[in-house]
């Protein structure tokens, strides 16, 4: 077959032959530039990049962690200062009140007795601690502090009332023990009073 007749017969396929030759040349060049296909890729796998980014996002800096802790402490102090705690006890030197204040409950207060269920101390209180001996006399409750407990819970059901006493042998069936939110011995460790405040705080 002459060269002319060969070109005439296969001329429709010549563009494809040129394209194939170009592709072969391109791949040989890429392989040579990569060191014959050996070695590690320049860019790290996409999966590793995502993991590293996530680790950075989920690991707060020491400064941020310290700031968050400071905000939590400040919030706790603000909450403690906003809770009004009223002790009603004829012994106004009862040491637990000052211990509560030292623990951050700055609004803890003690009075000898309640003269009116509408007085300011009563209306503002969130938690009452009632010593059931020697109080309730101003309002002439027959059962003294026990009668006061019942009256407070009836008038202010949302407020918390805790009975405490140093006496034993009290009438366990009195209604006051049913309506009170907690009961503590007056001789108990101060921590028990703090625990009651923490549990009953609004």
Image (cartoon, grey):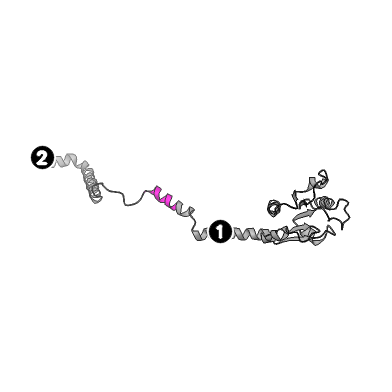
99 in the magenta segment: no
Which residue lies at the image location 10% right of the left edge and 40% below the top edge? 2
In the image, taking residue 129 as reference, residue 77 lies left or right, namely: left
From the image, give the main secondary structure of the stretch colored magenta: helix
Marks 1 and 2 sit apart, C-alpha to C-alpha, by: 89 Å
Secondary structure, mark 2, is loop
In the image, taking residue 155 as reference, residue 197 lies left or right, namely: left
The quadrant where residue 139 appears = bottom right
Q: Are marks 1 and 2 in contact (CB under 8 Å)?
A: no
User: In the drawing, what numbered circle is on residue 122?
Assistant: none
Which residue lies at the image location 69% right of the left edge and 59% below the top edge? 99
Q: What x and y, as percent, mark residue 159?
A: 76, 53
**Relative to residue 24, is residue 131 depicted above or below?**
below
Tell me which numbered mark, 1 or 2, is placed earlier along the sequence.
2
Comparing marks 1 and 2, which lies closer to the viewer?
A: 1
Q: Magenta region: which residues?
A: 45-53
Residue with the mark numbered 1: 68
Residue with the mark numbered 2: 2
Which residue lies at the image location 65% right of the left edge and 60% below the top edge? 78
């Amino acid at each position: 077959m002459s060269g002319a007749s060969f070109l005439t017969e296969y001329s429709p396929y010549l563009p494809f032959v040129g394209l194939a030759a170009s592709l072969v040349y391109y791949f040989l060049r890429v392989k040579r530039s990569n060191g014959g296909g050996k070695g590690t890729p320049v860019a790290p796998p996409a999966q590793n990049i995502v993991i590293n980014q996530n680790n950075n996002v989920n690991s707060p800096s020491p400064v941020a962690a310290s700031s968050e802790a400071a905000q939590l402490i400040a919030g706790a102090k603000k909450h403690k200062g906003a809770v009004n705690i009223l002790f009603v006890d004829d012994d106004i030197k009862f040491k637990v009140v000052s211990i509560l204040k030292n623990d951050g409950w700055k609004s803890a207060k003690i009075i000898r007795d309640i003269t009116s269920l509408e007085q300011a101390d009563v209306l503002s209180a969130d938690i009452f601690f009632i010593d059931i001996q020697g109080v309730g006399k101003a309002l002439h409750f027959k059962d003294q502090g026990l009668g006061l407990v019942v009256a407070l819970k009836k008038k202010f059901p949302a407020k918390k009332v805790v009975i405490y006493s140093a006496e034993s042998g009290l009438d366990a069936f009195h209604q006051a023990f049913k309506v009170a939110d907690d009961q503590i011995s007056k001789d108990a460790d101060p921590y028990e009073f703090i625990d009651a405040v923490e549990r009953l705080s609004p």
